[in-house]
Image: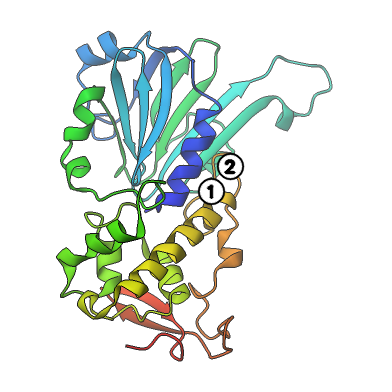
Amino acid sequence: MPELPEVETVKRGLNKLIIGRKIMAVNSDNSKSFPNALSDVKQFLIGSKITDVRRRAKVLMIDLSTKYTLVIHLKMTGQLVFVKLLPTIYNLPPTASETRYGGGHPTDSLIGVLPDKSTRVMFDFDDGSHLYFNDQRKFGWVRLMPTVEVPNIDFMKRVGPEPLESDFTPKQFAQRFKRRARTTIKAALLDQSVIAGVGNIYADESLWGAKIHPATKVADLPNSKFHLLYSELRSVMNLSIEKGGSTNRNYVNAEGKKGSYMEFARVFRREGLACPRCGTEIIKIRVAGRGTHICPKEQKI
């Protein structure tokens, strides 16, 4: 599943491409992927214009001029691919005959002819361009609902604050973890009700940066460590967004390019290599049911 930086890069890319476009038609081959009443689709989706693309945690939202929103979860293998065919120009190579931007699971659907066998939903815009929602495993979904009801989705009511918001302070960050005082700090970081959008990669990276062992109990961490963890988490996430997300096999950025953050990872998936700070061999352990990468010298309980 993508983490916050991967979904953020897709959001930023789509914001440059689909704002203002009018939806003329929608086709879907799977009711699980597109669980919406036909009457609602006809009344609130067809003929609407896209006004914004937003993100909350790992969920994308496409706002419409009808005051309805398409809420999209890519899950494990979802993709969003925008394709616009360019006017035919003689002697133009085939690869230059279209504008294509994609984000999501990096299968050939990102570069192949669409729709294909993995296409679950296809949106047709008024200028002849298209937005495809592809999903091999059919776990993802696109739901149409009134914009005012989006905050009332169970997930939206449970999810914690966004770690990169400018008004989210180190003090508030530390307070969020008090409810999980008896658990490990890594388990708490992965808990979406504590902090939104943090997954395995950025948990390991930020804990290494703060010199905190992932199995340390939340109650055993002083406020100074929480403040350091706050800074490290924001730093690694912002760097990942700048680099287009991670190359964790599953996600590419909104221009169809693999992210490059993993080239800068300090600990994640670097077991057997030297710690960038002290040279000790990085090891892989298991914490909170997840493979976890640490420097055993600098991250002690």
Q: Is residue 182 left or right of residue 209?
A: left
Q: Is residue 87 left or right of residue 256?
A: right
Of residue 271 and residue 231, the one placed in the foreground of this image is: 231
Tell me the SS state at disc 2: loop
Q: Is residue 121 above or below residue 103?
A: above
Residue positioned 25% across, 69% down in the render: 187
The x and y percentages for residue 76 are 36, 51
Q: Is residue 94 left or right of residue 175?
A: right
**What's under tag 1, amino acid-wise?**
Val
Q: Can the viewer see residue 221?
A: yes
Q: Is residue 95 left or right of residue 4?
A: right
Q: Can the viewer see residue 146?
A: no
The x and y percentages for residue 203 are 38, 67
Residue 79 picture quarter: top left
**What's under tag 2, amino acid-wise?**
Gly
Residue under pointer 1:
252
Q: Quadrant of the C terminus?
A: bottom left
Residue under pointer 2:
256
Label 2: few (<14), some (14–19) or many (≥20) C-alpha neighbours in 10 Å: many
Tell me the CA gap for discs 1 and 2: 6 Å
Tell me the SS state at disc 1: loop
Residue positioned 73% across, 29% down in the render: 96
